Image: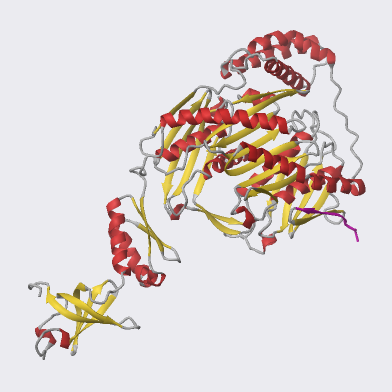
Amino acid sequence: MPTAIKKTFAYGAHTVTIETGEIARQAGGAVIVNMDDTVVLATVVAAKEAKTGQDFFPLTVDYVEKFYAAGRIPGGFFKREGRPTEKETLTSRLIDRPIRPLFPDGFYNEVQVIVTVLSLNPEIDSDIPAMIGASAALAISGVPFNGPIGACRVGYANGEYILNPTVEQLKTSQLNLVVAGTEAAVLMVESEAQELSEEVMLGSVVFGHQQMQAAIRAINELVEIAGKPEWNWQPPAKNEALINRVKELAGAQLEEAFRITSKQARTERVNEIRKNTIATITAELEAAPTGNELKDIFHELEAGIVRSRILAGEPRIDGRDTRTVRPIEIRVGVLPRTHGSALFTRGETQALVVATLGTGRDEQIIDAIAGEYRESFMLHYNFPPFSTGETGRMGVTKRREVGHGRLAKRALIAALPAPEDFSYTVRVVSEITESNGSSSMASVCGGSLALMDAGVPMKEHVAGIAMGLIKEGNRFAVLTDILGDEDHLGDMDFKVAGTERGVTALQMDIKIQGITKEIMQVALAQAGEGRMHILGIMKQSLASHRGEVSEFAPRMITMKINPEKIRDVIGKGGAVIRALQEETGTVIEIGDDGSVTISSVSAEGAQLAKEKIDAITAEVEVGKVYNGTVIRLLDFGAIVNIMPGRDGLLHVSQIANERVNNVADYVKEGQAVRVKVLETDERGKIRLSMKALLDQSAE
């Protein structure tokens, strides 16, 4: 039997064990990571040769959750796991982003990382074990990889950082941050925060990087014992003669092309230069160079032009300096029948964002591995190909769209009203209609404006901005509000969103071997300046929320009833509540705790439904006079209905001031009467006395 090799280390309040050698031995690298009973299997398989003509690095990362891990059977008809959930997609991206930049340039062999959740402790999220497992599997596989990486989650409560907080601890934490990096530097940050300062955010990243060294050390120790021989892979030698010829033909032209400030015009000119240069070189050489070789040369040439200008203090591609935000234009209420809408344009990036208000029945029901739960706030991001002037396939939501939507959602959550103060289900959709850098941050700004336009009582406006980095040796420049080309040719994508009070979301991806605390500090401070500038413009367009929800949104009334009265409102087989909804044109939802939500497009209908529910659930008060209806005559009196579902006995002795021989001589079935409640007993029986017939003068 194979013997597992294990390494164990303390990780905050948890114990982590990494083992290899027993399971999935035919994979290039395979490890089991156990973090307090949350167990994942991480495997790596890499092709020994790159495919002919391959011009990109084909890395795929798949994180897969199995319901048996939590002792559950999947819902749905087929009772098996299906297409990736949003959590699976986001975790796949979380693993991919820090490991991708650590593969060497020119390595085009296909690599597949698969992480499977085998066991789940509901208090320990599987994403951190998954990231550690992927790193360890790559490290022992021998594949060219400049790792390993470590990863951890950081919380913040009572002025202190928490390493790898549990699910329960996160409920009271002001921060939920995931950070990954190598021994030397940070590579990736993903976070959600409750309006924290830049200093606290920076401190959390530094704290996380320090603490993750325990995971990196354990992986390195595992590699020493169980690591496979490193591949004998060398990057392809550079053809200096070809590089110089491309520079000679295209260098000066590209210099001029990158002074064109319009994205479309610049792209067309660069493509034209590239096409003409390749045609000339192909005609000159007997053996034409490969497409990959020319592609890499052009990329380095373009990057060199853009980067050297910025580091020399020259204007950026569109003429701005490093700290200036592109011109912003805002329109709110742009769509006539939606609940809330905003058109946010920043330079050549534009988002049409729409907010829709619904009832509790519109909540998203998520069948997750840890159990079913509901979401009352949704944000969906769409990136159609026309936004970049290109053709492309429409259909299935891509991983990038899911990730950008989640980032924008995280940014806005901190400013939303509490559910008990605003019981609507809210959906925000961001349609990217133009894109040239940071469409996710445009979605944050547009989302905040659309929500306020819909009348959602947001605490404050939320704005987002994307920062870039150009770094050569010890010189670096941080760029405010980066363009698409600056993202493509730069070293960092650093997105910060927040209110005037602090940061609500932060996401960072690094394309080099990590960045320092100093660079992050500069980027956060510069992002704060840009965010305040954008917030000022947003407030000029819409200072605050509308005060009331859109006329096209459902009106909602919330109330509380005695839980023992729920069955009276619902009625036998739901007859009472169905009749109420049909009569008032409303949707009525009742919780087990007696909370009632009434929604209707008509405010009058919602109010009428409330009054009827009040009448059904009202308590009978001794000494109070009620208008009732005689529903049955008895030998010794009459049964009178005084409120929905509540009948009382009007005894013959309480009908008149004289002796009554025949009840029918005084009251008749269906007759309206005024009665007074004399008493109620512990069994709920009510005794009444006659005050008057309503068709006669009252006493």
Q: Is residue 285 left or right of residue 445?
A: right
Viewer-closest of 663 and 538: 538
* Above or below, comparing residue 462 to residue 137 in the picture: above
> Could one spot residue 58 in this view of the protein?
no
Figure quadrant of residue 324: top right
Viewer-closest of 40 and 73: 40
Percent x, y of residue 451:
44, 40
> Could one spot residue 463 in this view of the protein?
yes
Q: Is residue 54 left or right of residue 408?
A: right
Percent x, y of residue 105:
79, 29
Percent x, y of residue 465:
57, 31
* Above or below, comparing residue 455 to residue 694 in the picture: above
Q: Residue at x 76, y 8 (%)?
A: 248
Q: Name, please, the residue furthest toward the left.
A: 697
Query: Where, quadrant-wise, is the N terminus in this rendering?
Result: bottom right
For the record, the magenta segment spans 1-11
Viewer-closest of 460 and 157: 157
Magenta segment: does it hold 6? yes
Viewer-closest of 220 and 284: 220
Query: Where, quadrant-wise, is the C terminus in this rendering?
Result: bottom left
Magenta segment: does it hold 207? no
Q: Residue at x 52, y 27 (%)?
A: 533
* Above or below, comparing residue 230 to residue 569 in the picture: above
Figure quadrant of residue 204: top right
Q: Main secondary structure of the magenta part?
A: strand
Percent x, y of residue 603:
30, 51
